[in-house]
Every structure is written in C-alpha cells, then in structure tokens.
Image (cartoon, grey):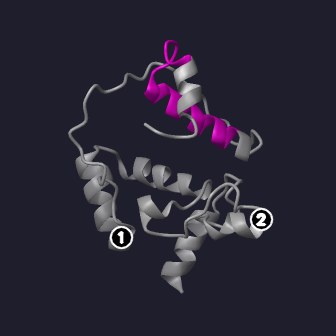
Amino acid sequence: MDSLFEPIFQKYCDSISRADFWALLGWLSINLSSSGAIPISFQYGRKDAVTCSVPRTRLPDAQLGRGAINQVFIAQMGLTLTDAVTLIGAHTIGHVHPAASGYGTAATPTTVTTTADLQTNAWDTTPQTFDNRYFRGLISTVLY
C-alpha cells in the first residue's frame, strides 16, 4: 500500500496491526480536528485480514443515493444504518480524491497554498474541522 502513512506504519508494524493503525489515524484525526471536544475512546485489538475477496470498487456510487448505501454498507458489509451514516460523516474532514470518488480536481501538496485551495478539493468548507457541515450540505442539496 503506497501512502503518506506507509513509512510510519512500517516503523511500528511489529507493534500494531494495519487495521489498528488506520483506526488510530482516524481517531487522531477526529481528536485533533475537534480539539478534543468529541470524546471518542480507542481500543486496540483489530486483526488484519490475510486476503480480501471484495474488489477495490466496493464503495457505493455517490450518485445512486440511499439504495447504494444500503446495498454496500448494510447488505454487503453488515453495518447498521447508524454505522453507515457515521462512516459517511467522516467526509466532514479531509479532501476529495478524484481517482476514488470522481469528484474534485487533481492537486498535490505543493499546489495547495491557501484556504481556498484546500476547500477546492474538500467535501465541505471546513475540511480541517470535525463538524456536521458535510451533512448540512447534503441536506441543503436534497431539500432545495
């Protein structure tokens, strides 16, 4: 897996599973972006899967709405609707990756120099803050 975090994982891979490592990164992201206002506990113990029979295109198509969410997250992955909504809510932090989502424009860290640049490839207007803007944007798009 080629990513910005792979060298960090490799440094500690004898002490933490890849599954726990990615969960820890998510926990850190929420903790830092909410300034600790959202208390979430972290628990170690996830095991890495040796194989995965699910193709990399396993995420729901954003254009297909709740039916796709139900099919992928609930029927295929066994999540509850609450779990799925929580997972989707993680889009409130971070950025769009055109190769993964089909949204946004290609950007590199060297081209991102202003707040406006950061927002160009973000799911909402505050990609560095864990808040409810992503959901508010979804609701306003659907209702108006």
- At 49% from the left and 50% from the top, the residue drawn is 86
Kind of residue at disc 1: Gly
- Mark closer to the observer (2, 1): 2
Kind of residue at disc 2: Thr
Q: Secondary structure at mark 1?
A: helix
- At 34% from the left and 55% from the top, the residue drawn is 59
Residue on which the image places disc 2: 115
- At 62% from the left and 58% from the top, the residue drawn is 108
Residue on which the image places disc 1: 65
- Can residue 17 be seen at all in this image of the molecule? yes
Q: Secondary structure at mark 2?
A: helix
Question: Sequence order check: which comes first, mark 2 or mark 1?
Answer: 1
Dot 2 surroundings within 10 Å: few (below 14), some, or many (20 or more)?
Answer: few
Region of the chain picked out in magenta, as a range: 12-31
Give the Cα separation between the discs numbered 2 and 1: 30 Å
Residue 127: percent from the left, percent from the top? Answer: 67, 58
Say if 80 sits above or below 18 in the image: below
Characterize the magenta stretch by its predominant secondary structure.
helix
Tag shown at residue 122: none
Q: Residue furthest front?
A: 110
